[in-house]
């Protein structure tokens, strides 16, 4: 365990040092990403100048859903997506042997090998906005609700990460597939809206098969009291299932890769 913690620290230090070598680019790209996220937030404010609710969610709740989605995706984009993109490219080129010879867990190393520090701007900006809304727009929020909200954000990042990783590992079985991370982002994008706007079969799909409901709707629901503790339990269990599935798919893919190489 200590070895993995030290590795995370070293990977983070190395990524930060690489980013600071080009600190102007880091600042410019980071600010542009912050502005990109702020644009969708501002559009929502204009929408609520015309309507009072979206589905049965009021202005503050929908803004929190949007901000929570930004926080969750910023976490994965900062710590996990750069490494996964690199792994996907090398998997398409059939050159992943360097991962196989590492004396640590392959999935761990492939996921955290590279960080993108430009997403810190989005993460901090959205976090500050969430704190502001909680302090000024919500009453009676308990410490337990805040802790559960933060736990659900962490689980949301696990959901998205596992979903992307499973799609990337499909390359083991379907030969060359490019830009899978973009496909995953498109499929995950509905998570920026309350899932109650999706009716019938789509509502089931977006809560189970592609569980975008856990991206932001459930965390905000837990924070505001819309959703009870059963959703926290379900989130923990379902996130565990997705992690296990991603690991099993990787193991099956490695066996296929090794068999083809042998």
Image (tube, helix red, strand yellow):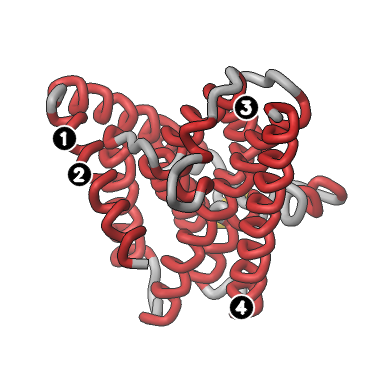
Specify few, some or many for label 3: CA neighbours under 10 Å numbering under 14, 14-19, or 20 or more. some
Helix, strand or loop for disc 3: helix
The numbered mark, 2 or 4, whose residue comes first in the sequence reads 2
Disc 1/disc 4 C-alpha distance (Å): 43 Å
Q: Nearer the viewer, residue 85 or 74?
A: 85
Of marks 1 and 3, the one in the foreground = 1
Q: Nearer the viewer, residue 150 or 173?
A: 173
Disc 1/disc 3 C-alpha distance (Å): 28 Å
Which residue, given by chain and number where applicable, does mark 1 sit on?
Answer: 17
Which residue, given by chain and number where applicable, does mark 3 sit on?
Answer: 180
Q: Residue furthest right?
A: 201
Of marks 2 and 4, the one in the foreground = 2
Which residue, given by chain and number where applicable, does mark 2 sit on?
Answer: 13
Q: Picture coordinates of residue 89 (x, y %)? A: 53, 22
Q: Is residue 128 left or right of residue 91?
A: left
Helix, strand or loop for disc 4: loop
Which residue, given by chain and number where applicable, does mark 4 sit on?
Answer: 228
Of marks 2 and 3, the one in the foreground = 2
Picture residue at 65% right of the left edge, 78% below the top:
230
């Amino acid at each position: 365990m200590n070895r993995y913690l030290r590795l995370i620290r070293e990977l983070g230090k190395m990524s930060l040092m690489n980013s600071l070598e080009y600190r102007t680019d880091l600042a410019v790209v980071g600010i542009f990403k912050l502005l990109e996220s702020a644009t969708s937030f501002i559009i929502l404010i204009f929408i609520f100048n015309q309507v009072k609710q979206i589905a049965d969610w009021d202005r503050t709740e929908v803004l929190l859903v949007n901000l929570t989605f930004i926080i969750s995706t910023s976490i994965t984009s900062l710590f996990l997506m750069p490494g996964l993109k690199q792994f996907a490219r090398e998997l398409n080129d059939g050159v992943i042997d360097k991962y196989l010879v590492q004396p640590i867990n392959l999935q761990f190393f492939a996921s955290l090998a590279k960080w993108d520090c430009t997403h810190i701007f989005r993460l901090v900006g959205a976090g500050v906005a969430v704190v502001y809304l909680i302090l000024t727009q919500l009453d009676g929020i308990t410490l337990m609700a805040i802790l559960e909200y933060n736990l659900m954000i962490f689980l949301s990042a696990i959901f998205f990460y596992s979903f992307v990783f499973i799609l990337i590992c499909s390359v083991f079985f379907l030969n060359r597939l490019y830009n899978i991370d973009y496909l995953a982002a498109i499929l995950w994008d509905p998570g920026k809206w309350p899932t109650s706007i999706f009716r019938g079969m789509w509502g089931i799909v977006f809560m189970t098969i592609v569980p975008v409901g856990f991206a932001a709707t459930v965390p905000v629901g837990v924070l505001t009291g819309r959703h009870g503790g059963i959703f926290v339990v379900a989130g923990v269990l379902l996130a565990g299932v997705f992690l296990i599935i991603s690991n099993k798919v990787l193991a099956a893919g490695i066996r296929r890769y090794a068999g083809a190489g042998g």
